[in-house]
Amino acid sequence: MSKTPSPQGAGPARVPQLLRAAQLGTGPLTGVMLSAAAVLTVVAGVIPTAYAAIGLTALPLVFLLVGAVLAVFMPGYLAAARVCPSAGGLYTVIAAGLGRVPGVGAAWLAVVGYLSVQVAAYGAVGSALGPLIGEATGWRLPWWAVALSCWALVSTLGVLRVTVSAKVLAVLCAGELLIVMLTSASNVGSVLFSGHPHPIDLADSFDPAGLGSPAIGGALVIVVLAYVGIEQGIPYAEEARPRAVPQATLLTLGLITGLYTVSAWAMTVPDGPARTIEHAGEYGTNLVALAALDQLGEPAANAVRLLFGTSLIAAMLAFHNTGSRYVFSLARERVLPAWIARTHTRTAAPIWASALQSAAVAAVIGAYTVAGWDPVTRMFYLFGAAGGFAVLCLLTATSLAAVFLLHGPDQPRLGVWTRLICPIVATVLLAAMVALALVNFAAVLGVAETSPLRWEVPAALAVLTAAGCARGLWLRTARPEVYASIGRATRAALPEQLPDSPYREPQSA
């Protein structure tokens, strides 16, 4: 294993483990990010659920606006990531821009957030693939049997070379994108070529007046959470080829914004927005498959059902790999035990970080199985909302961190748009979305307004973040050599005066 020399003053806290560089190009990394976004899960699951729960006809416009907000976020985000290319991803940027203590808090939130999204996918995959397996084989498998089969696959791929996972994700992603485009084209074609009585109308779906609806808060939250995964290029910065991360990130954002917007609109074309909302309430996540059955036949409907399940598996693998790299990065900097940062001698995969992710998921599946809890209502929605909200908070903190990081005296000179305007505007907009998420969290969870879960979940994430910050404070006093390495990763060229706060407080010795 090659080693990176320790910067002066870092002492034994520098950990030499490295991930294999230049493995991923723009195409494979785009596949990883699209898989994390779980495009078909959003189109077949989230969009019908949003129509049914929120009842907002202007949902396509909301997708377009959230995509625009994230486009404003990207220049500062990508510039900050170039300064701190690390498997620690958002954690490294936050530590460099806002200080090591909030950086550790963000790292803890990121690890649990990505783990939560993984767990959510396991909760839904049994109900997605179980019936198909039963129809094909006659075996009526319980949800946990399907989930554990997927767990074994993801756990195996997680310790192989990252390019193997990227190839698997590329195949699954291609199927998702094809069926999403096919069903959207079919919805529009059913009107254009079949003499459908309802004319194609863009007015309701893209009417700005719809943004004044009382339902806009809940719609914004659901749509924002549908974009989770767009930030996943940065943790692969150490393994990606030059320019692959920014190219893949921007390409992914453009693709999913277009696909989500068009799919949400095309879903309303056959029967109109009002009737679509009624059908979404009646058929739920089966709406897209039933439309495919009516317009394209049974093979297309079965393809939607199958690829919906594989979309969840792709998301599991993508979030597993990303979460493993966060854990690896923390262990490499001794915030977690150093043995966790070991990489495989042949595949260069973070094997112990991956194994810990797998063990945590297995524990949750086991607990839900023993307790007899419903995997969809009490696992998919609960963990999915928690993980999505955690990532939204991390994006907000990252945008704020970029404002301070990109003004550092050691950073390359950037245009005012990249280093100031975009990060500030994005921070304000993302913070507003965090506030909306808190106010409308019951709608995201699918529970009553009076349910204690609407406050318990955000409060638990806040306590977790505070515990991470407390860990950072303890390290500053008890283990200053470890504290000095937080957020530095393998970047020996980073300045020794890496800021402890936006105001560059004096460093510990």
Image (cartoon, rainbow, N blue to C red):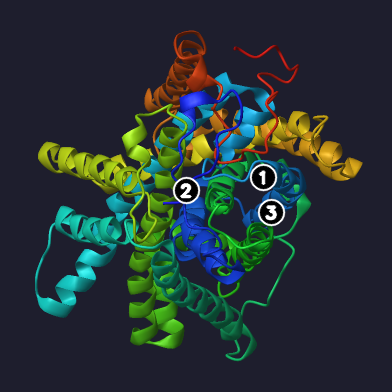
Question: Which of pointers 1 and 3 lies earlier in the amino acid sequence?
Answer: 3
| Amino acid bearing label 1 | Ala
Q: Are marks 1 and 2 in contact (CB under 8 Å)?
A: no
Classed neighbour count for the residue bearing mark 3: other residues with Cα under 10 Å, few (<14), some (14–19), many (≥20): many
Classed neighbour count for the residue bearing mark 1: other residues with Cα under 10 Å, few (<14), some (14–19), many (≥20): many
Q: CA distance from mark 1 to mark 2?
A: 18 Å
**In which quadrant of the rendered view does residue 366 lie?**
top left
| Amino acid bearing label 3 | Gly
Residue 110's x, y, as percent? 48, 36
Q: Residue under circle 1?
A: 81
Q: Say which residue appears at 77% left-offset and 38% top-offset.
A: 423
Viewer-proximal residue, 214 or 335?
335
Mark 3 secondary-structure assignment: helix
Q: Residue under circle 3?
A: 67
Question: Which of pointers 1 and 2 lies earlier in the amino acid sequence?
Answer: 2
Q: Residue under circle 2?
A: 18
